[in-house]
Image: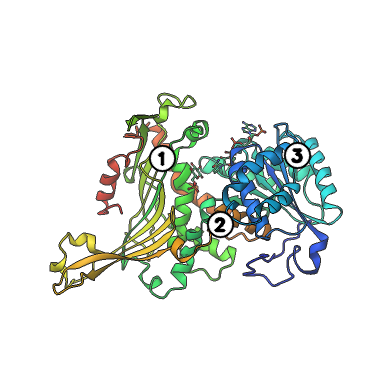
Amino acid sequence: GLAEEPISRANSKPVAMEGSSPFSGSRKEESSLSIIIVGASGDLARKKIFPALFALFYEDCLPENVTVFGYARSKMTDEELRNMISQTLTCRIDKRENCGDKMDEFLKRCFYHSGEYNSVEHFAQLDCKLKEKEGGRSSFRLFYLSIPPNIFVDVVRCASTSASSKNGWTRVIVEKPFGRDSESSRELTKCLKQYLAEDQIFRIDHYLGKELVENLSVLRFSNLVFEPLWSRNYIRNVQFIFSEDFGAEGRGGYFDNYGIIRDIMQNHLLQILALFAMETPVSLDAEDIRNEKVKVLRSMRQLQLEDVMVGQYKGHNKGGRTYPGYTDDPTVPNDSLTPTFAAAALFIDNARWDGVPFLMRAGKALHTKRAEIRVQFRHVPGNLFKRNFGTDLDKATNELVLRLQPDEAIYLKINNKVPGLGMRLDRSDLNLLYKARYPKEIPDAYERLLLDAIEGERRLFIRSDELDAAWSLFTPLLKELEEKKIAPELYPYGSRGPVGVHYLAAKHNVRWG
Ligand code: NDP
Ligand code: BG6
């Protein structure tokens, strides 16, 4: 009984026709949306999901009859849940006017049900409460699994058995990690598919919800000046850089079982790479885009140990403060070899990208927080101005940078003449700085993704064959790293990372941007 139909976006209305949604036009009175956050007592729910839902509510993007249910084992009353949420709701909205009333309105729609994750009975109790709120209208239910992965399947089993919608759709958003290698990921997919159809599963990779990642396809496919250059003919290398200025503190238990390659590279950076490198999709339809992403992932060479380096942060004293090493965390074994930093050179064996190194680097506890895509172009052949560069010519190639965060920006490094009577060349940026161009705050990735899941837009969610292709690339390497007990190169907390990262790049004639 799944009613899958296009739903239009309430505020922006970009795709579907007016009135096609169960939440718009004449049908809106008859429909109700219930969003159930499983693991509502947790960190992600508090910091990201509830605030994103409130932001959507504030922007009038949610349907009229919307109810939000928190579900977890912790005992809490509705009132206690509301108190908990209200602490973090202000984080994005407090600059706006009239926020208080909206917040009260939102909180009135939030409820809590305490239950076990493996109890069909407890989910049946939840179902009763949901039905009461839905008041006989057609019911559309979105479950958000904000829980550790070992209980995903229990929850899906119980929710689909006793709390799925009888006269509308039921969708489930799943958070990573989606397994820890090809095998466990396939097993997870298989188990989820015992209870859910693929089109009910929304695998989230929140990097796909980031504004500049969304913009990547717009930049490529709606500007004449970029797409013709988008190949081995003009691009020397592409870099995907992620760094955080804090370590795995407080998440050591999770992190030690995964490491930075699984935490960031196999998903966030690889997803961006796929969008960057894919061929032009037939249309903007989710299946067309995901087909192209899978194709490019399947054209990639499996990662080899010699094309990877790993690091781990160690304790460090700086400015009178002591920063803990990774293994100082009580939840991390003292002899842990788990990488908190990694860099890799990847290759796409197709006509467009043959021989172009795609470099990734991701690290925790570094000196800065940033995420960027850097595209380094080739030298200008027979450059007339060779002599006019004071510095090394290598630095004078064009570079396009998409800064995903912080301070979203797209800039292109070009060469220009220093004004004056001489002929000296300089490098400048053609710079689109988002906060200067668009004063309105950029929505959080979770806002876009939640709205998409409500609207049934799957473009930004990971399809199971995509996930499989992504794991195939990384699984043999991850196994080898573990089997050979490759020791990570240590780097001090707050530093620029291990020096080995430069050797890896140099091997491929690349200089990090
Ligand atoms: P938490 O560890 O805070 O877990 C969420 C809730 O799940 C807890 O409040 C707890 O609720 C319940 N829970 C925790 N451990 C167990 C357990 N061993 N058995 C049963 N229930 C348990 O996780 P987060 O909120 O940080 O993250 C949720 C999910 O999202 C995880 O899968 C995580 O990997 C993923 N994720 C998190 C990110 C983040 O920034 N935090 C980023 C990306 C993904 P109760 O005890 O009340 O039942
Ligand atoms: C999560 C990782 O997926 O992404 C975390 O598990 C990381 O380790 C986080 O901190 C980074 O997300 P963002 O949006 O803050 O860059």
The residue furthest right is 136
Residue 371, position in %: x, y? Answer: 42, 51
What residue is at 32 percent from the left and 39 percent from the top? 495
CA separation in Å, label 2 and label 1: 25 Å
Q: Foreground: 166 or 282?
A: 166
Residue 258, position in %: x, y? Answer: 48, 37
Horizontal side of residue 8 vs 262, given as left or right = right
Return the mark for residue 233. none
**Are there few (<14), some (14-19), or many (20+) residues within 10 Å of tag 3?**
some
Assess mark 1: CB under 8 A from ligand 2?
Answer: yes
Q: Foreground: 93 or 195?
A: 93
**Are there few (<14), some (14-19), or many (20+) residues within 10 Å of tag 1?**
many
Residue under pointer 2: 443
Q: Earlier in the sequence, mark 2 or mark 1?
A: 1
Residue under pointer 3: 78
**Are there few (<14), some (14-19), or many (20+) residues within 10 Å of tag 2?**
some
Q: Earlier in the sequence, mark 2 or mark 3?
A: 3
Quarter-of-image position of residue 84? top right
Q: Foreground: 188 or 12?
A: 12
Residue 213, position in %: x, y? Answer: 48, 59
Give the structural element (helix, strand or loop) at label 3: helix
Return the mark for residue 364. 1
What residue is at 53 percent from the left and 71 percent from the top? 282
Give the structural element (helix, strand or loop) at label 1: loop
